Amino acid sequence: MASDLPDLSLSEFSEAVAAESPEVLPESALTALHQHYSELRRWNAGLGLIGPGTAHEVVRRHYGEALAALPWIADQPMVAVDIGSGGGFPGLVLAAARPRMEMTLVEAREKKWSFLMAAARRAALPCRCLNARVTSPLPQGLPDRFDLLTARAVKLEPEALRALASRLDGAGSILLWVGAHDSEIPPELSPGRSLKLPGSERRRILELRRTTEFGHP
């Protein structure tokens, strides 16, 4: 049974998120994130969206680690895809902080997909929620082109990464939240910047960019 998440008021939650965010978030973003958190608390016991090992540090480990990528994501219109969204990390969190982003949240497990739809609706975020497993060939419903791809604690097979990279805009990037064991990176992608996440020796955000031109898969 998943541990209960702490009951945080909007002011308590906003203060905790502000302490973890690399930039000042507007009130609208903090309100949206608190609405997401309220829905997370409601669903967590049944779905285990946040495991008992990190429930006591949910803001730092989940919201903070998602927001850590903000310095790498321009505040401008863009199309983004988040693979394996689960509890909404990092995709829904980034969509709240970057409201001009068109975000598609992709989740293979139907119950967690249902949670994402409920959370996005409660937070008033226009995220598309796609119930699909990302393999090669890619599932229907993914954008034909996108500027940003994110995935946290998801091991993507090289064939899937290659197919996703073929839809990545030439100036776009893939951000992977990885631990001790990275996804195998195909030669069509090149590692770029790496950001160590606070409080961990292993967790980091890894940036990938395209090394060759692709046609559509």
Image (spheres, rainbow, N blue to C red):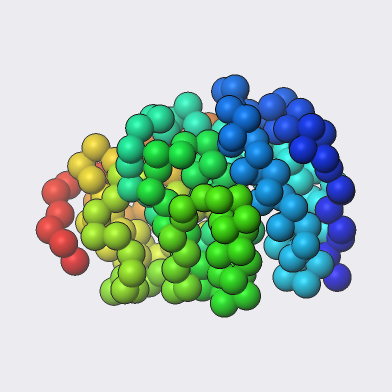
Q: Residue at x 33, y 47 (%)?
A: 79
Q: Residue at x 44, y 60 (%)?
A: 128
What is the x, y in percent for residue 138? 31, 70
Toward the viewer: 162 or 99? Answer: 99
Q: Residue at x 47, y 73 (%)?
A: 131
What is the x, y in percent for residue 163? 27, 63
What is the x, y in percent for residue 178? 55, 48
Is 212 positioned to the left or the right of 43 in the image?
A: left
Q: Which quadrant is the C terminus positioned in? A: bottom left
What is the x, y in percent for residue 114? 59, 71
Is 191 positioned to the left or the right of 54 in the image?
A: left
Is 50 positioned to the left or the right of 77 in the image?
A: right
Count numbered badges in the picture.
0
Q: Residue at x 76, y 46 (%)?
A: 58
Q: Which quadrant is the N terminus positioned in? A: bottom right
- Is residue 133 visible in this depiction of the protein? no
Q: Is residue 38 above or below residue 69?
A: below
Toward the viewer: 25 or 122? Answer: 122
